[in-house]
Amino acid sequence: MKLNSKDLAFLKSFKRDFDNDFSKVIAEDKRLLTYRYAREIALRVAEGGKRLRPILVYLAASLAGYNDIKKIRRLGFVIELIHIASLLHDDVMDDADMRRGKKTVNYQDGNSVAILSGDYLYSLAYRMALEFEKPIPEIISVAASHLAKGQMMETVLSGNFYLSFSDYIRIIYNKTAVMFECAMKIGSMLGGDANISKKLSMFGRYLGYGFQITDDILDYTGSVDLLGKPILSDLAEGKVTIPFVLSRNCSNSSEIKKMKQLWEEKTDFAAVKDWVIENDGIALAKSVCLNYIKKADNLLAGIKNCYEKELLTKIANQTVFRER
């Protein structure tokens, strides 16, 4: 199922309305972001992005029978603020100079500004989360702590040529899938249906797995123009991702020895990429991705048929075939 013109128009309209209010939330905050320079940094960082997590909050709430758009959007702000803050910190740790086709804050303004801007956005998100009844604030806080855990795991395991598949999955759960899971969980909780909330939470987790696996595939197969950042950047940073893991698991000892040497030398990433492709790393990774998306789709069985359910299914399947 592909997104059609109606779907794209809806998503564009949702993003436009969300972004208009989102900018106001940051621009009008008087508590912490009092200096014009810091406010401009925050607004600049908020530009771009798909707003995927806020749309998941909206769709989950709608499927659970909740329709107060102002509260739904407010909850979407919380999730997006945390997401953007995590990107600011990730860019510092990765020493990245490009994000979404633009120079990163750490590249333009320095690491201190990037870190402090991220800290501000986290604090704003937590203040906004407290507007909602328990256990929503606690769920958001725990999910955000998983982001730090995932980044820590990735940092500690960086450069590990023999990273296992299970460790990889643990990393991407904490780094990515947990916020998809959180968005679906808190959105559906607004409707008060525990059964639907449980299903949609797991849907979010599987969708998050598929999203990150696709990201890791695109690091090998994508283009700078579409991704807005250099390809093979994971290899350059010493990160082992699923195409590499599955290629290594399909290789004989002599091939592994050769690739380990190339990996350690970090001089011929093109050869490593060719090896990954020749050993079906990309195809196998796509198969794993499709399996997670299938699991996600199956969770929607039994939930009433409606446009929101159809759109959620399309978004999940579009995750596998996207180019950016």
Image (cartoon, grey):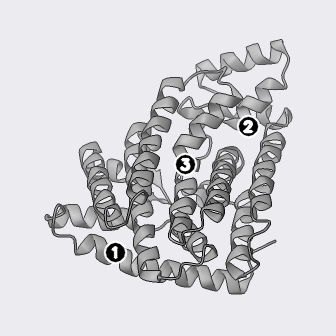
Mark 2, Cα crowd under 10 Å, few <14 / some 14-19 / many 20+, is: many
Amino acid residing under circle 3:
Val
Amino acid residing under circle 1:
Ser
Measured Cα–Cα span from mark 1 to mark 2? 38 Å
Residue 287 in view = yes
Query: In this picture, is 172 found above or below 33?
Result: above
Query: In this picture, is 267 found above or below 67?
Result: above
Q: What is the secondary structure assignment of the residue under circle 1?
A: helix
Quarter occupied by the N terminus:
bottom right
Mark nearer the N terminus (3 vs 1): 1
Q: Position of residue 158 (x, y in %)?
A: 53, 26
What's the residue at 43%, 68% (across, down)?
A: 75
Q: What is the secondary structure assignment of the residue under circle 2?
A: helix
Measured Cα–Cα span from mark 3 to mark 2? 21 Å
Q: Check disc 1 and report the residue beneath it.
A: 23
Mark nearer the N terminus (1 vs 2): 1
Q: Check disc 2 and report the residue beneath it.
A: 243
Mark 3, Cα crowd under 10 Å, few <14 / some 14-19 / many 20+, is: many
Mark nearer the N terminus (3 vs 2): 3
What's the residue at 60%, 19% (across, down)?
A: 265
Q: Check disc 3 and report the residue beneath it.
A: 178
Residue 66 picture quarter: bottom right
Residue 271 picture quarter: top right
- Front residue of 193/285: it is 193
Residue 50 in view = no
